[in-house]
């Protein structure tokens, strides 16, 4: 019997769960920002607009890139754009692409931007949180928020009531399975609660 060639759509699954549970998402990954959000106003899904802003380059499918507009309680006229990127593969130009997204979003909307990268890959060499540029006295420094899946503590995730703790736990297990030999993969799968 031939093996199924169907692969799991990790990017699409991330995008769907973030879109379905956006308040829980922001509460889990950016609790200080989530406290300021006026949740009586529905966040605006700007993902179609984000696709038009994609920087050119040698990148893969960017379905997990997400852009939402939320409104703050005390400054309801000043929206905050939340740009989310789930990065699961090694890309030497990733930090530059994040900056390109940032300035394109800023140019289009001219608003406050909260940028978050969730690293689900296992290679620390490609887990930057900044982009720097310098040329003959012209300097630029851009830093963004990051969340590294593999650094999360399993027991803390299990104890958390936020649904995203289980999303992170599942992603952590997927990274472990991806990088282990077949016997260890079986052990990890057997121990998933």
Image: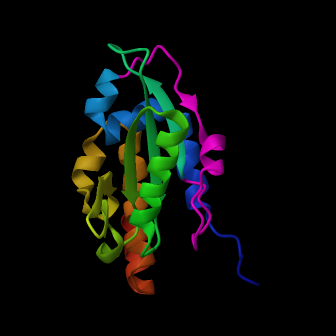
Give the total number of marks visible in the rendering: 0
Residue 49 part of the magenta segment: yes
In this view, 11 is above or below 66: below
* Residue 187 can be seen in this image: yes
Give the image location of residue 163, x and y in percent.
41, 39
In this view, 27 is above or below 130: above
Q: Is residue 130 left or right of residue 80?
A: left
Write the residue at 34% across / 33% down.
27
Which quadrant would residue 112 be assigned to in this image? top left
Write the residue at 29% across / 48% down.
157
Give the image location of residue 172, x and y in percent.
37, 62
Give the image location of residue 186, x and y in percent.
43, 77
Q: Is residue 44 left or right of residue 126?
A: right
Write the residue at 57% across / 70% down.
59
| Part of the protein shown in magenta | 37-64
Q: Quadrant of the N terminus?
A: bottom right
Q: Nearer the viewer, residue 56 or 123?
A: 56
Q: Quadrant of the C terminus?
A: bottom left
Write the residue at 49% across / 52% down.
101
* Residue 193 can be seen in this image: no
**Residue furthest to the front:** 136
Which quadrant would residue 8 be assigned to in this image? bottom right
Residue 104 part of the magenta segment: no
Q: Nearer the viewer, residue 115 or 19?
A: 115
């Amino acid at each position: 019997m031939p093996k199924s060639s169907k692969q799991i759509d990790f990017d699409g699954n991330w995008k769907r769960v973030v879109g379905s549970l956006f308040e829980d998402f922001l509460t889990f990954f950016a609790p200080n920002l989530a406290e300021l959000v006026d949740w009586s106003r529905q966040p605006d899904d700007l993902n179609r607009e984000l696709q038009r802003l994609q920087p050119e380059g040698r990148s893969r499918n960017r379905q997990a890139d997400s852009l939402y507009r939320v409104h703050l309680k005390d400054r309801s006229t000043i929206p905050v754009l939340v740009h989310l990127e789930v990065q699961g593969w090694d890309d030497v130009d990733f930090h530059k692409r994040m900056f390109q997204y940032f300035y394109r979003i800023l140019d289009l909307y001219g608003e406050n931007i909260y940028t978050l990268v969730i690293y689900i890959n296992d290679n620390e060499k490609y887990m930057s949180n900044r982009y720097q540029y310098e040329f003959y006295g012209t300097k630029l420094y851009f830093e963004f928020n990051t969340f590294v899946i593999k650094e999360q503590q399993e027991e803390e995730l299990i104890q958390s009531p936020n649904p995203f703790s289980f999303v992170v736990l599942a992603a952590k297990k997927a990274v472990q399975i991806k990088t282990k030999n077949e016997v260890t993969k079986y052990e990890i799968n057997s121990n998933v609660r």
